[in-house]
Amino acid sequence: MAQNPPGTFTGLDLYTFAAEKSALAVIDAYSTSFGMAVSLLDKKYRQHVANIYALVRVADEVVDGSAAEAKKAGGTVDPSVAIDQLEKDVYRALKEQYSTNLVVHAFVKTANAAGIGRELIKPFFDSMRMDLWKTKHDQKSFEKYIYGSAEVVGLMCLKVFLVGENYSNADVHTMTSGAQALGAAFQKVNFLRDLAADNAGLGRSYFPGLDPRKLTDAKRDELVADIRNDLKVASKSIRVLPKGAQRAVGAAQILFQVLNDMIAVTPAEKLMQTRISVPDWYKVVMIIRVIFGWFPK
């Protein structure tokens, strides 16, 4: 990931180095699973994917976590203003190639290098804003939210993987569909495992027409099957990806596939009382299997 600064470096080099170290710190603090998967990426991809994750995580905290807590504690932060300012900072930094926000600075380095523009950034921030006001979704708003909050993140990472590569249109289509499907599956699994917290703590229900308090085993099975369909689409693209990305993407998919399988055998009533997670030892076993060439099907 972030390397030691070169022997001869400018002030901007050092600043960018510090910015990328901050992006790595965000991963270390928030996601052991994602961090494990990122570590399997080829060196040329690792830092860029970390830079993407850090911005996504910070934006999510603005609308869904620390900013709201700060406001409840008596602070004057307005999450809706803060998320607008963060988005504007990203666009400004894309042009200026500099930001006083270290996470934004790291992200725009990646965005400019990989060609990530407003066509992917705006839908992401639009979905983040939906968390500030929308507590229930219909099918249309659900699909829009999934695309902006998860699918575009997969597409951003794909942009990184394809820098300098030469693929046929058919292969690019396969990888694009896979990136979107995998992002959607990740988000839906997170919705399912966080049903209780989202409903009780935030008053939210993401799945259209679902009252989490009335979740049945039959409805759980329907949602699990939908996620499995997404994962099936995603699995077709893994071996098409550049080799330096295959193991990491495969590991990430396997971890969420296991989570989905665990949810499938958990009584609906229990899903509303506990958050399902994969034991750390099992994560290690799955990652070792990927290292030795086992990929999800």
Image (spheres, rainbow, N blue to C red):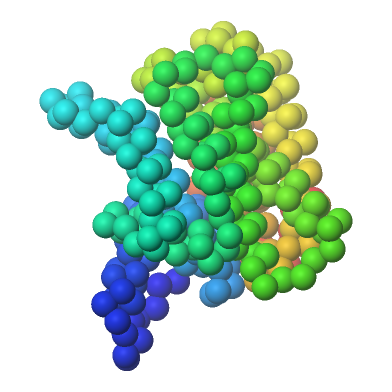
- Residue 279, given in percent of the width and then of the height, sits at 50, 47
Rendered position, 78 above or below 255: above
Left or right: 170, with 158 as reference point? right
Q: Which residue appears at 60% of the width and 21% of the height?
A: 141
Q: Nearer the viewer, residue 202 or 101?
A: 101
Examine the image and state in which quarter residue 245 appears: bottom right
Q: Nearer the viewer, residue 171 or 86?
A: 86
Rendered position, 268 above or below 277: above
Q: Which residue appears at 80% of the width and 52% of the height?
A: 174
Q: Residue furthest bottom?
A: 7
| Residue 39 seen from this side | no
| Residue 18 seen from this side | yes
- The N terminus is located in which quarter? bottom left
Left or right: 9, with 262 as reference point? left
Q: Which residue appears at 71% of the width and 23% of the height?
A: 221
Left or right: 49, with 81 as reference point? right
Q: Nearer the viewer, residue 7 or 290?
A: 7
Q: Nearer the viewer, residue 40 or 117?
A: 117
Q: Residue furthest front?
A: 95
- Residue 274, given in percent of the width and then of the height, sits at 46, 27
- Residue 280, given in percent of the width and then of the height, sits at 48, 52
- Residue 73, given in percent of the width and then of the height, sits at 16, 27
Number of numbered discs visible in the structure rendering: 0
Q: Which residue appears at 21% of the width and 31% of the height?
A: 77
